[in-house]
């Protein structure tokens, strides 16, 4: 990033802002910590417009309904009014249906008749009582009429004269205000009104959605312009305007050309150590698909490594490990390819991500031998039959191998994270700050290498003890005494002991966390197997019908499994990335995304 400071004569400032906005590469430096009430109201308006656009986008947009467009502002205000009316109607309908559920046991009645009886000195009491407690003798003692039974309750009425106090052990219910027929009439009217409002909203979705989107962009541009003016320093008795901003190095040519051609005074330079330029990620095609995952946590701060290209392959593998069904992987990959050309531009990146995750799921499904819940190692297929026999001879099975694979992948990512931490420390603070981290890398990789040599060559590990002692000595000095060459030895030793305790306990806990990959993969396979068994056992023996029942159970069951297991496969690798990997890589984050001052419409 390059910092630009512009000095512009006040009479030329408005046209300068417009030209800078057309070029659209300057991220303005915010100098006001608090925004005005006017800007805050504009932000609220933008949120409302975005909500309206989101709601209209979900509606039935028919080209046949398209006609002459209304202005964006007028259309937005009309749609917002319609949604307010719609919400009010739904609230009325909810209250009405609640009243109907209370009146329903009493059926239909005439309020006028009850009032006429009251005028003659006859009053109607409404009662409810559990059906088991209704006393048949009440018919002989009082003029009682049972209206109906509902949910184990008996509802009845009693006609009494003024002054009479019936001795009935039942709950005296407040008489309904309106009969059920009147409520049903109002319900029909409300449903008609709701339908009419929805039809109006469908028309707006067809005719005015783009106009409302454009209106939202215009409001956003107005806010950006207002903030640009608010972040301008006025110099020399308000005659000179000072504006500052950040520009990516590869995008500054057009801006510099404009400034030179128009003789605008500017100063540019690299950011100082205490400054926090915005972050513009520069990932290639594959890694770019995973940027949305990294954004859920935090952007890197300036001069810090962007970990997206480093965690992307691991996340892809971990997702495939957790879902681990070749059939699900094929479905995901094919669906992503089919939808990628049909979805909106902002969703194409998601479809690309789903495709890669589907490929990883297929690969791990082939390794684990699971296809739509079917255990391929038990089917007798040539390759899987031979592998199963070989595993049995060695006293193991594919599940045990997958368990160890989860731990191996975890160990690889942890060590890789430490390597990135050393690179990050060197990049930000110099190599003297990275000696301690390098010592841990040397200790871990060296110990694994010595163990591997012993296992592969059959050499007793005792013969490698001299090499192990040298390794421990060198790495120990780096970890305990030289962990930061800018501090004195005693401070390094104290902090080194504390860091050693944290590293030993932390790495062990981090490594065990990767067992979740194996556990989720097993649970996904078991659920698929369960749904297959249900489909077979519940299909019956009636020709054609049994196939239909089996198909329904399989589709619904595997759909549920794909959703539930897919959700776990999405969340848990993310947890491993943001907790275990980011911690071991020394990621701090806190960067602010690059948002240039530019024209949107």
Image (cartoon, grey):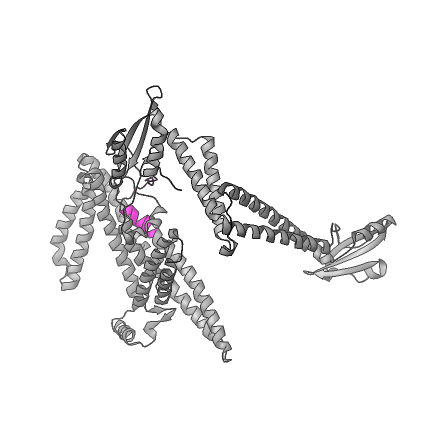
* The image quarter in which residue 271 lies: top left
Q: Is residue 451 above or below residue 438?
A: below
Residue 343 shows up from this direction: yes
In this picture, residue 173 sits left or right of residue 79: right
Q: Residue at x 35, y 28 (%)?
A: 13
* The image quarter in which residue 315 lies: bottom left
Residue 508 shows up from this direction: no
Is 582 one of the magenta-colored residues? yes
Q: Quadrant of the N terminus?
A: top left
Is 193 one of the magenta-colored residues? no
Q: Which residues are magenta?
A: 575-596
Task: Name the spot of residue 82 as percent of width and height, x first.
Answer: 57, 46
Q: Residue at x 37, y 30 (%)?
A: 14
Question: 345 or 319: nearer the eye?
Answer: 345
In this picture, residue 26 sits left or right of residue 148: left
Task: Name the spot of residue 276 as percent of width and height, x first.
Answer: 30, 35
Name of the residue lying farthest toward the right: 120
Question: 67 or 49: nearer the eye?
Answer: 67
Q: Quadrant of the C terminus?
A: top left
Question: 505 or 438: nearer the eye?
Answer: 438
Task: Name the spot of residue 86 as percent of width and height, x first.
Answer: 58, 48
Name of the residue lying farthest toward the front: 68
Q: How many marks?
A: 0
Task: Name the spot of residue 209 as percent of width and height, x first.
Answer: 48, 48
């Amino acid at each position: 990033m390059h910092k630009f400071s512009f000095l512009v004569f006040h009479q030329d400032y408005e046209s300068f802002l417009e030209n800078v906005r057309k070029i659209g590469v300057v991220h303005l430096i915010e100098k006001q910590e608090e925004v005005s009430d006017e800007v805050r109201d504009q932000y609220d308006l933008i949120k409302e417009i975005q909500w309206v656009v989101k709601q209209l986008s979900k509606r039935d947009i028919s080209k046949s309904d398209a006609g002459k467009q209304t202005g964006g502002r007028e259309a937005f205000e009309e749609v917002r009014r319609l949604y307010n009316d719609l919400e009010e109607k739904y609230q009325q309908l909810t209250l009405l249906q609640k009243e109907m559920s209370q009146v329903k046991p009493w059926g239909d009645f005439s309020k006028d008749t009850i009032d006429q009886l009251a005028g003659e000195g006859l009053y109607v009491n409404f009662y409810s009582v559990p059906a088991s407690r209704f006393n048949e003798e009440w018919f002989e003692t009082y003029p009682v009429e049972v209206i109906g039974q509902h949910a184990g309750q008996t509802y009845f009425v009693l006609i009494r004269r003024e002054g009479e106090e019936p001795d009935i052990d039942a709950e005296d219910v407040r008489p309904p205000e309106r009969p059920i027929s009147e409520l049903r009439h109002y319900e029909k009217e409300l449903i008609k009104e709701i339908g009419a409002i929805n039809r109006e909203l469908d028309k707006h979705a067809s005719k005015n959605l783009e106009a409302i989107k454009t209106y939202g962009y215009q409001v956003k541009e107005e806010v950006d312009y207002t903030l640009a003016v608010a972040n301008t320093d006025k110099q020399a008795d308000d005659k000179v305007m000072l504006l500052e901003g950040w520009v990516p190095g590869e995008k500054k040519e057009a801006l510099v050309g404009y400034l030179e051609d128009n003789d605008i005074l500017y100063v540019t330079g690299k950011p100082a150590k205490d400054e926090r330029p915005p972050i513009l990620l520069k990932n290639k095609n594959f890694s770019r698909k995973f940027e949305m995952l990294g954004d859920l946590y935090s952007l890197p701060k300036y001069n810090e490594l962007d970990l997206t290209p480093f965690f992307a392959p691991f996340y892809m593998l971990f997702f495939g490990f957790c879902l681990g069904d070749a059939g699900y992987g094929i479905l995901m990959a094919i669906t992503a390819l089919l939808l990628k050309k049909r979805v909106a531009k902002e969703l194409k990146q998601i479809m690309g991500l789903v495709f890669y995750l589907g490929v990883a799921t297929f690969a791990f499904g082939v390794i684990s031998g699971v296809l739509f819940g079917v255990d391929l190692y038990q089917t007798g297929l040539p390759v899987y039959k031979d592998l199963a026999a070989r595993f049995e001879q060695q006293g193991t099975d594919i599940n045990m191998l997958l368990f160890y694979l989860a731990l191996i992948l975890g160990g690889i990512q942890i060590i890789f994270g430490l390597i990135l931490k050393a690179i990050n420390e060197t990049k930000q603070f110099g190599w003297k700050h990275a000696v301690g981290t390098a010592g841990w890398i040397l200790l871990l990789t060296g110990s694994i290498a010595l163990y591997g040599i012993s296992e592969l060559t059959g050499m007793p590990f005792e013969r490698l003890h001299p090499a192990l002692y040298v390794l421990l000595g060198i790495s120990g000095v780096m970890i305990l005494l030289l962990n930061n060459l800018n501090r004195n030895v005693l401070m390094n030793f104290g902090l080194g002991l504390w860091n050693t305790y944290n590293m030993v306990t932390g790495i062990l806990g981090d490594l065990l966390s990767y067992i979740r990959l194996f556990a989720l993969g097993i649970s996904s396979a078991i659920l698929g197997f369960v749904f297959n068994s249900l489909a077979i056992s519940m299909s019956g023996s009636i020709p054609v019908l049994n196939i239909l029942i089996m198909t329904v159970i399989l589709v619904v069951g595997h759909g549920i499994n794909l959703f539930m297991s897919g959700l776990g496969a999405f969340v848990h690798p993310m947890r491993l990335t943001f907790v275990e990997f980011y911690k071991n890589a020394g990621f701090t984050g806190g960067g602010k995304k690059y948002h240039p001052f530019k024209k949107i419409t």
